[in-house]
Amino acid sequence: MQIAKIIGSVVATQKDEGLRDHKLLVCQVHNHENKPQNQYVVAVDAVGAGPGDLVLYATGSSARQTLQTKDRPCDAVVMAVVDSWDQNGSNVYEKWSE
Amino acid sequence: MYLGRVIGRVVASQRYEGLDGVPLQIVQPLDERGASMGGSLIACSAISSGPGDLIHYVDGREAALALPDETFVPVDATIMGFVEQAVVGETDLAKEPEPSR
């Protein structure tokens, strides 16, 4: 999984039948020092995340392992909203202190 | 499967239903000499690992199968064992001191 920030959503009325009623989120990948990277992913939302949230997304065939995306053409899914993380003993991000 | 070291922990209370109680940890993949290899990633832990531990992990769809309870979950990396010995040539990576950060 990787950390990403939700920076927008995708609206597409003409899409695969299997992806109807799915929320598609535009996510900008962040590294583990919380620096935004020049890498973007469109992912299906499985947890009810919103704009500005830092989230975890899973990619590849693992992304199909939710009730929402089972047997659907999907290769990235948002599976958790990050509250905080620490690395090498020091706190990098704290959601509630922003 | 890959060799890695746990370098951090992630807290996420709002998560996919089947993942309740599963620890999320930051893993730095290591090469055959124990040096960092590529960027770090977030993995679920199926064992009681913590920061500093030398571990092995599995990625891809199989990662969900390594979890103890619910296996139909959107997980693409899972820590599944401690490394007690990893001999490459003459050196045992598990006995090498952890690089200072």
Image (cartoon, coloured by chain):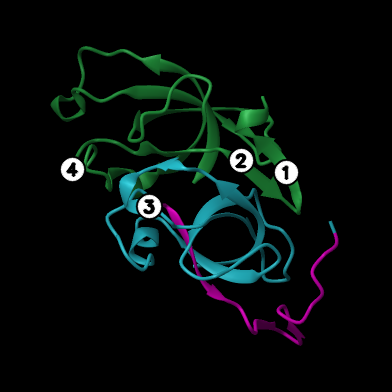
Chain colours: A green, B cyan
Which label sits on residue A71? 4
Q: Label 4 sits on what residue type?
A: Asp
Q: Could you tell me which residue is drawn at 35 percent across and 48 percent down?
A: B74
In the depicted view, which residue is nearer to us: B41 or A14?
A: B41
Q: Identify the residue position indicated by label 2 in the image.
A: A84
Disc 4 crowd rating (10 Å Cα; few below 14, some 14-19, many 20+) is: few
Looking at the image, do the residues carrying marks 2 and 4 touch, with CB atoms under 8 Å apart? no
Asked if both marks, 3 and 4, belong to the same chain, the answer given is no
Q: CA distance from mark 2 to mark 4?
A: 32 Å
Give me the chain letter of mark 3: B
Give me the chain letter of mark 4: A
Tag 2, which secondary structure? Answer: strand
Which label sits on residue A91? 1
Give me the chain letter of mark 1: A
Q: CA distance from mark 1 to mark 3?
A: 23 Å
Disc 2 crowd rating (10 Å Cα; few below 14, some 14-19, many 20+) is: some
Dot 2 or dot 1, earlier in sequence: 2
| Residue B1 position (above or below residue A71) | below
Q: Could you tell me which residue is drawn at 67 percent across and 36 percent down?
A: A93
| Residue B57 position (above or below residue A35) | below
Residue A71 visible from this viewpoint: yes
Tag 3, which secondary structure? Answer: helix
Q: Identify the residue position indicated by label 3 in the image.
A: B19
